[in-house]
Amino acid sequence: MPMRDLFAWQMLGDTVKVCSWVFGFVLLGRAMVREFILTEILFSVSWVLWVYVFCSSFGAGGAQIGYFVNYVIHLFVMIYLVVVRVKFDEKN
């Protein structure tokens, strides 16, 4: 029962992560491998930093909150890369 509160953040994070994967696959399909790899490395490191920040404030539940926040930001970056960069590439 004490873990029940953590599952909501984990499920939200997983849902957002899968949405960002969709945009990641678009990057790979457009041969933007470098951007894909850089975002994966960047957001792996940022996840650790978010966990550190949120665990100091929220305890063990901060890990799931950090996971969620990290992938929300990741999703917005992926949307930006796909929408803006792909449209820019199509114009050139």
Image (cartoon, rainbow, N blue to C red):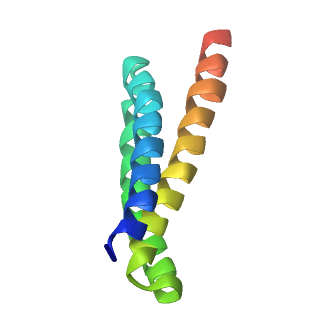
Q: Position of residue 23 (x, y in %)?
A: 47, 29
Of 34 and 1, the residue lying toward us = 1
Q: Is residue 15 above or below residue 57?
A: above
| Label tally | 0
Q: Position of residue 74 (x, y in %)?
A: 51, 48
Q: Name the side, left or right, on which 6 lies relative to 71.
A: left
- Which residue is at 48% across, 71% downward? 50
> Which quarter of the rendered picture does the C terminus lie within?
top right
Q: Name the side, left or right, on which 90 lies relative to 34.
A: right
- Which residue is at 43% across, 80% downward? 52
Of 60 and 45, the residue lying toward us = 60
Q: Position of residue 7 (x, y in %)?
A: 37, 61
- Which residue is at 44% across, 22% downward? 26
Q: Name the side, left or right, on which 13 lies relative to 3.
A: right
View extreme (front): residue: 1
- Which residue is at 48% across, 44% downward? 16
Q: Position of residue 61 (x, y in %)?
A: 42, 76
Of 60 and 51, the residue lying toward us = 60
> Which quarter of the rendered picture does the N terminus lie within?
bottom left
Q: Is residue 91 above or below residue 28?
A: above
